[in-house]
Amino acid sequence: MTALATSLTPTHLHFLEALFPGDGLVTRPEEMAVYGADSSRRSAMPWAVVRPRTEEQIVELLRWAEAERVPLVPRLRGTGMSGGAVPAFGGVVVSTLWLNRVLDIDAEDFCAEVEPGVVTAEFQALTQKRRLFYPPDPASLKISTLGGNVATCAGGMRAVKYGVTRDYVLGVRAVLPGGKICDAGGRAHKNVVGLDLTRLFVGSCGTLGIFTKLTLKLLPLPESSATVLAAFGSLHDALEGARGVFRAGILPTALEFMDATACRGIAQIKDVPWPTAPNGDTRAVLLLKIDGSASALADELARLERALSQAGPSCLLKGLGPREEEPLWEIRRLVSPAAFQLGPDKLGEDIAVPRGSTVQAVEGFQALGAEHGVHVACYGHLGDGNIHVNIIYDAQDEGQRARAKACKEAVFRLTLSLGGTISGEHGTGITKAPYVSWQLSETERALMAGIKQVFDPSGILNPGKGWV
Ligand code: 2HG
Ligand code: ZN
């Protein structure tokens, strides 16, 4: 196999200038820097940035890149948390943000066709106007895009009841290295002809093709919803409260939690509705959402309150309908940035464990934080076992850096020993790449390497972000 290019030649640059006239090509470092970073806080300078406006440009680009062996790093808003969009191993960044049209929203087929650069929350607002519902709701939804969500198989809060991005992708149109177009899947909600190439693209982090169109599944919009916030004096009570909800036969739309450290972080940037010292000592918060028909919701809400009350919350707050609920969910979405109030750096992990092991996992992570002498904030998607473990530290301090890393590795070991996964929703990117082999067997990695080879024989797409 011919080696990949290690930089752009003047001839390469002339080609890119011709294919991406005007502001379609960016080469000034001060403008490119933002395209080299993502929410992992890792960054690398791209060789150049191209901003296609059409699929034809992407086809030409991939034909050229394959022939010249120039690495390409596809990217959208860069809200990924694991460095998946960072050109850490060199290459031209391909921003498909300008492919941002909603092509179709169809209330009969219950599906939509969109380009990858459509912002998730804006798309959801459009579907809601038609009484339709696109459930995946990563915390970044106000800025992240559908293309990025599909590339990373983004999760979110409503996954407990509705599943993750993967469950809503019916079809993917992608340009492959060499310029061929693959139109996988389509508008049918069921399809078992051949292998599931659509699902292969979902979560592939730009390593198999560059998306130009996505076909998404929609649901009828639930008629009504309610949110309950329950504060507890102990983490254990909160975790038991969450178990009690499922034991009562309730399937919440979302079931989130925050431990004492996460609560402390958020209280530093926002007025919080739960008791704080000196009036009360909140050690954990649960935030739950239910939805359904208006007539069924009142009964479900009463059952939910009863189930939670049995765990002895210090306060129980209710929000009925989006206007009352949204401020409570905004608090939750701010926990991730608020963690930086507790220290200058964090390792933001997103492990997931089998749902029956959540109590053991969360209590274990906190013990590991204490053992390694680092602050650990645990919060997130308790209802589906996907726990954010934020290890807070100061990267300038060598000792803290080493302890944070050791704590992270111990968190991974505990997770795997419980039958879990080192990444439930953020992907492995570059931050977790060294740990992939802790989880995936040699056989699995060989199969994945073989699949990559079929799609991208020269390895030009997002190099270094594989699973081998
Ligand atoms: C969330 O659920 C995001 O808030 C970010 O997935 C989590 O920063 C994190 O670790
Ligand atoms: Zn999350």
Image (cartoon, grey):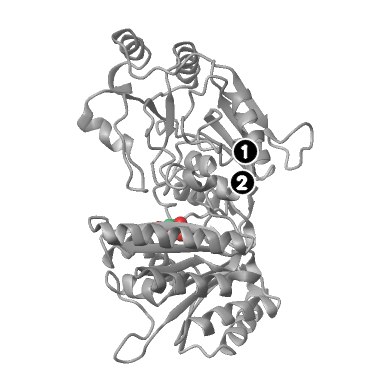
Estimate the x, y position of residue 264 in percent, counting from the top left: 33, 75
Estimate the x, y position of residue 91 in percent, counting from the top left: 38, 25
Q: Is mark 2 within 8 Å of ligand 2?
A: no
Q: Nearer the viewer, residue 102 or 316?
A: 316
Query: Which image quarter holds the C terminus?
Result: top right
Identify residue for label 1: 445
Q: Mark 2 and mark 1 in contact? Answer it, CB < 8 Å.
A: yes
Q: Nearer the viewer, residue 421 or 114?
A: 421
Identify the residue shown where x is 53% and y is 53%. Answer: 423
Estimate the x, y position of residue 222 in percent, counting from the top left: 61, 62
Identify residue for label 2: 440
Q: Give the left or right position of residue 289, taking residue 431 as reference.
A: right
**Height in image: 23 above or below 383?**
above
Numbered disc 2: secondary structure: loop
Query: Which comes sooner in the sequence, label 2 or label 1?
Result: 2
**Could you say which quadrant of the image residue 255 lies in?**
bottom right
